[in-house]
Amino acid sequence: MLELDGISAGYGRAQVLRELSLTVETGEILCLLGRNGAGKTTTMLATMGLLPLTAGAVRLDGREISRLPAHMVPRAGLGYVPQGRRLFADLTVAQNLEIGLRARRSGPETLEEVLTLFPRLRDRYQQRAQTLSGGEQQMLATARALCLRPKALLLDEPTEGLQPSMIEAIRRVIVQMRETGVAVLMVEQRVDAVLSVADRVTFIENGQARESLSAEALRRDHALVERYVGV
Amino acid sequence: MEIGPYFLLATLEGAVTAAVLALTAVGLSLVFGVMRVVNIAHGEFFMLGAVIAWWVAQAVGGHPALGFAAALVIAPLIVGGLAAAADMTILKRLDYDPERTIVATIGLLYVIQQVTLMTYGPEARPVEAPFGTRLAIPWIEHAEGGWRLYWPWGLSTTSYKLAVMAAAAAVLLGVWALMARTRIGLVMRATQMDRGMALAFGIPVERVYALVFGLGAGLAALAAVLIVPIRQAHYLMGADPLLLSFIVVIIGGLGSLPGTVVAAVLIGLSDGIISVFFSPTLAKIIATLLVALVLVFRPQGLFGTRAA
Ligand SMILES: Nc1ncnc2c1ncn2[C@@H]1O[C@H](COP(=O)(O)OP(=O)(O)OP(=O)(O)O)[C@@H](O)[C@H]1O
Ligand SMILES: [Mg+2]
């Protein structure tokens, strides 16, 4: 279970997150919805320990990971697929995955599992990440995070700019992660995509978590979507 | 003597400069590439290497080769250790902010220089070369009755100078292998490409930085140990290598190791040749002019890639 307990964070003197709280149960997909600039990416960065918290705590299965130095957070079992992929561009697919594997000393069987999920990466194994297509890059970014054997997985707009078949491939993998008991926290702009995978949705506005409700309830009543993400 | 033998002599001298410069500049380039820190104190790490080499050679005594061999190991280790400590106590606290680290390394430059002046003194002191057989070089000339080989007076080098070139080449190959072929090299390159993502994948970036800063300083110290039997150890000797390293790193492309080596050879050779035929000052002027041209027409350097 991943728990953000009243976290505040920002950039320099500009505060972005204001006592934001949410929890993601194991085997659950929670979607963050909110306008551009609402603080979704900032939430991810603060959870990963890449931005210092000014208040609050982040707990993973009860352990307070926000006390750890940033490089120990992934080792506790947090996998991160950042917005814009941020691959190690000059490294090959194999090397990008190796860095993922090393973080929690995952063995070759983990690599096999990940490559089975994304067979395309096996064909591109010695190719530099920079030269992959956008969809392949997104697969690699996801695969790299899965190499950690994460307990919780953070995905920041994983389907941005992808064609439907690619979105479907990523979606299948995310659902599969849920089945194995991973807590999935996902940012997604497209509401139809959200509703097809999410168990629960939390709206975020001005760095604060507002309403939180089941995807089921949201499907019945679209009004909230209009209010928090409509233009 | 005609111009040919002179030219060869100048080229050999330039090649020694190039070898030492390549090592020093690769150290600077590595630090800038991975950490984005412009290390103004780099020349002082070079100087410290030479001064410590003198101290070690004095302490060991016996055959010059013994003291030199000891210095070759000990000086880079001490200097690398000092640099890593400076990184952890000073640069880390500044959060590696580009401007503040420049100011901090300027401060470090003066501290190292003044402490050396107070302890080692203002004298220039030599370290004896471990070996130094004079090797005369033949030249051909056209005399009556055809070509003949002769040994022009003054055309010679020493076995030690050739060894410096070989050692520099070997070390550079080692650095390349470290970066391209080892796990620690992979971790360093990942840190260089995206510091935040390196952290997000469990790479202890602070430790990588300390290692890289130590390695960069250690390379400068190693270069100094190699050159100190040819040029003496002096507390102000760091200025020239610093200037030339910056020239080389800018021409070669910031952070590009192959570019740095090519530029070092280019600048080292031209420095040697122009110094012999004209004057060392002209050599520096031309090198600086070259930097200006590169900055205007190819700001990313000869081998650098344009920042995205
Ligand atoms: N590096 C930064 N320095 C200063 N302010 C920043 C920085 N990154 C983001 N911000 C500010 O923080 C706020 C939240 O940004 P954030 O990236 O978290 O938004 P987001 O919800 O992810 O938006 P989007 O949907 O566009 O990705 C914005 O107002 C943004 O301008
Ligand atoms: Mg965002």
Image (cartoon, coloured by chain):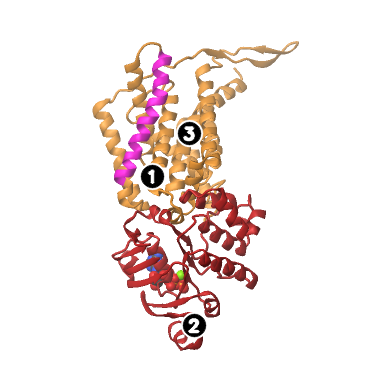
Disc nearest the viewer among 1 and 3: 1
Q: Is residue B303 visible?
A: yes
Crowding at mark 2 (Cα within 10 Å: few <14, some 14-19, many 20+): some
Does the segment drawn in magenta span residue B86?
A: yes
Q: Quadrant of the N terminus of chain A?
A: bottom left
Q: Which mark is residue B207?
A: 1
Q: Which mark is residue A180?
A: none
Residue B94: x %, y % from top left: 31, 51
Q: Which three-letter amino acid code belongs to the residue tagged 1?
A: Arg
Q: Give residue B81's quadrant in the image.
A: top left
Q: Is residue A52 left or right of residue A35?
A: left
Q: Is residue B229 above or below residue B38?
A: above
Residue receiving disc 3: B23
Name the secondary structure under disc 2: helix
Apparent colour of chain A: red
| Chain designation of label 1 | B
Residue range of the region highlighted in magenta in the rendering: B64-90
- Same subunit, tags 1 and 2: no
Viewer-nearest residue: B242 or B221: B221
- Is the shortest distance between ligand 1 and the CB of mark 1 under 8 Å? no
Residue receiving disc 2: A216
Q: Which three-letter amino acid code belongs to the residue tagged 3?
A: Leu
Viewer-nearest residue: A213 or B190: A213
Residue A55: x %, y % from top left: 28, 66
State the predominant SS element of the stretch in magenta.
helix
Name the secondary structure under disc 3: helix
Residue B307: x %, y % from top left: 52, 55
Apparent colour of chain B: orange
Q: Is residue A167 left or right of residue B287?
A: right
| Chain designation of label 3 | B
**First of labels 1, 3 by sequence position:** 3
Gap in angstroms between the C-alphas marked 1 and 2? 48 Å
